[in-house]
Image: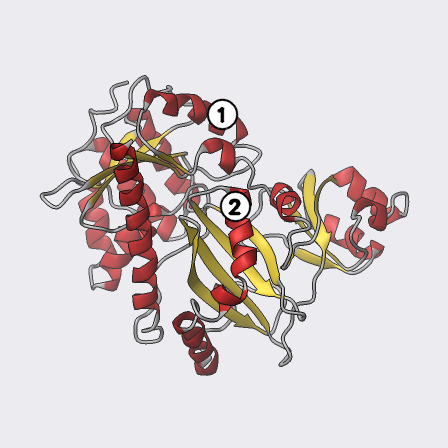
Amino acid sequence: MNPDDGPRQPILSIATLMRRLASGDELAGLVNIAANDPDGANSLMSLSAIFHFTGNPEMGLELQAKALNLRQHFHLSRQNNQTEICLLAIMRPGGMMDNTPLDFLLDHPCVAVDLLFVSTDLPVPTALPDHDLIFIGISQSEHNQPLLKLVENLIKLSSRPILNTPERITRLSRDSVSAMLQHTPDIEIPVTKRISRSDLQQIASGEKSITLTLEDGDFPIIARPTDSHAGKALNRIDNQSDITTYLKTQTASEFHIARFVDYHSLDGLYRKCRLVLIDCRPYAVHLAISDHWMVHYTNAGMSENAARRQEEEQFMANFDQNFAQRHHQALHAIAKRLELDYVVIDCGETTDGRLLVFEADNIGFVHAMDPVDLFPYKQPQMQKVFEAFYQMLKHAVRQHERA
């Protein structure tokens, strides 16, 4: 494989698709543009993005696989007369939750982005496209462990800086993050255990004790299949019989469990914020406010509630002087222990004021796609995030040049 035999035009990514639709382009027109691209691999990859975006991920994955059988190297954005940095992102085949969503995060005129897709089922590249630095975008999962090991060897072909190295991504499982952050001052993170289906059934029957399985707590607990995200199959379990009911709805063989932490505020609402640590510095991404403990921005009703949007606006405006300052030591400890250049953190606050960490990973959705008429305050905030990401890339390149 010669990775430099790549296309001259960028692919139509999901982020590009969303922006063009928001600006008034018709979906049918974009489908026509993608389908008629003379570059067959580019056409298939762009059509794959369209099917992912329109809710048909199975067809999206099928088209993506056909594209990758033709070529594994694609341009996300091409070089121009403003280009200062050529970034090579190493990704895995899959959907939006399988890689860092760089197409939403990085749209900078001074950065040209190439995507190199790797898989244990695809030929291993023997050379890498020209680049100034590499960013590993592959998510952590049990399935991805062999792939991340493969990438560890692949990047030895480069003498350039590597951001979010594979061995550090492998430590982002829920149980591993929990273990790394246990007993950290000012942080509340429940012990998270990986448990087999049979062990969970034994807890349900009384053969095993939940208090011996989770050394820091008792019922209620939360449970979810391993490698699941976005609240999929996440349930609160209040007693042994609830486990039996839960397992009737699940086919997974392994689960993550942790004690439930009631983090409601004095007004009875639950607040979950998404932060991103870029080069160890925290930036606000969103604040979701909900009546329910399982908070996701898409189901929190932020679009329908002006008061909650106003609170989020104030959260962003005062983030550096308020939330980030209040939890400075905790966030510094997270950055130091995870050792990632870029990491997304979902968190809240306990009733006694500690930082409650729900999750830390490299694939959380960071974007500026919310309607500007409802969320005008998000645009300047997200531009700060995007600029920080660009400056991180620039700093890494300059450090390497000086070495």
Question: Mark 1 or 2 closer to N-term?
Answer: 1
Identify which residue is drawn at 68% across, 45% down.
Answer: 256
Rendered location of residue 175, percent (x, y): 65, 43
Residue ID for mark 2: 336
Rendered location of residue 343, percent (x, y): 46, 48
Callout 2 environment at 10 Å: few (<14), some (14 to 19), or many (20+)? few
Residue 84 figure quarter: top left
Identify which residue is drawn at 37% across, 42% down.
Answer: 60
Measure the alpha-carbon separation of dots 1 and 2: 23 Å
- Camera-side residue: 13 or 90? 90
Q: Secondary structure at mark 1?
A: helix
Question: Does residue 98 lie above or below 119 as drawn?
Answer: below
Q: Residue furthest right?
A: 207
Amino acid beneath label 1: Lys
Amino acid beneath label 2: Lys
Q: Residue furthest left?
A: 81
314 left or right of 290? left
Residue ID for mark 1: 149
Q: Quadrant of the C terminus?
A: top left
Q: Is residue 120 visible?
A: no
Q: Is residue 277 visible?
A: yes
- Camera-side residue: 67 or 358? 358
Do residues under tags 1 and 2 come within 8 Å of each other at their CB atoms? Answer: no
Question: Does residue 194 lie above or below 108 as drawn?
Answer: above
117 left or right of 36? right
Identify which residue is drawn at 30% across, 71% down.
Answer: 372
Q: Which mark is residue 300?
A: none
124 left or right of 9? right
Rendered location of residue 1, percent (x, y): 28, 18
